Image (cartoon, rainbow, N blue to C red):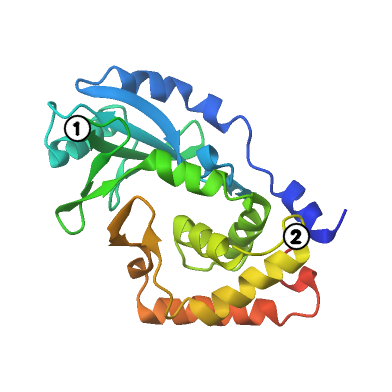
Amino acid sequence: MTLLDDVLVKYKAHINAPQLVSPLVTKLRYRTGVESVTFSGSYAKGTAVRVGSSGSDIDLFISFSPSSYTLRGAYEDIYEFASSNNLAPRRQNVSIGINFNGIKVDLVPARRQEGYTNWHSLYVSKASTWTQTNVAQHIQTVSNSNRISEIKLGKIWKRLHNIDIPAFYLELIFIQALKYKQQGNLSANFQAALDYLASEITTLKIVDPSNSNNIISDTLTPTQKFSVASAAKHAAKATYWSDVIW
């Protein structure tokens, strides 16, 4: 095994995390208007890692029926649920952050669009607007990319060095960077992904695969992108992987 393989083993995600939040899932499924509660994010995609005392957040996607609440109403309903259950909720852009059984959980309320199974509308609280999403397509895009190990290394690197880039943004960049690279060559591929990140992030347009109007690359400012590029450039020039990821 190489050092990078060892790193993947070292930061393997908490396999029991989904079971630890199952009582929460059960409670949420009985909320008025809720049609389903599913795992989304890194645990659903297979890209979850555990760095330090905490691992990847668990994302619970809460699908409300089209005839239930307004988008804001669904968001506020889940916030009220968390408050009434003493979960100390934190308002985030499209989610409500809580801690449950020692696990960081992001509750993502959404309203299913009429006539569809996977297309949903999300309330964007910071801008008091909405956006369209298809979480099932997000999961499929990443989980079927054949780049899970490289993405995990990228997320471990991001956490070890406190790199400010959203996980989905990083996942999509790594998939783009390795589009024509041979599978299985972990060291060369991770190097290529870091090189690509360093050279392209400041100008590269990354679009949500489920919504062409949602520009993922707009989630970072030019200054933030420059900071990520500098960190990636420094990592890509390192002599030993142990200086980059450990």
Residue at 63% across, 53% down: 147
Question: Where is 11 relative to 235, above or below?
Answer: above
Q: Left or right: 67 with respect to 147? A: left
Quarter of the image for residue 62 reads: top left
Quarter of the image for residue 30 reads: top left
Looking at the rendered structure, the kind of residue marked 1 is: Asp
Q: Say which element carries label 2.
A: helix
Whole-percent x and y of residue 47?
58, 47
Q: CA distance from mark 1 to mark 2?
A: 44 Å
Question: Residue 165 or 132: which is nearer the viewer?
Answer: 132
Residue at 41% across, 43% down: 137
Residue at the disc numbered 1: 77
Whole-percent x and y of residue 150?
66, 58
Q: Say which element carries label 1.
A: helix
Crowd class of label 1 (few under 14; some 14 to 19; many from 20; radius 10 Å): some
Looking at the rendered structure, the kind of residue marked 2 is: Leu
Q: Left or right: 74 with respect to 44? A: left
- Can residue 74 be seen here? The reply is yes
Residue at 28% across, 38% down: 119
What residue occupies the far right of the structure in this picture?
A: 1
Residue at the disc numbered 2: 186
Whole-percent x and y of residue 220?
37, 71
Which quadrant would the C terminus be assigned to in this image? bottom right
Mark sitting earlier along the chain (1/2): 1
Question: Where is 193 relative to 23, above or below?
Answer: below
Question: Residue 155 or 136: which is nearer the viewer?
Answer: 136
So how many labels did they put on this image? 2
Whole-percent x and y of residue 19?
54, 24
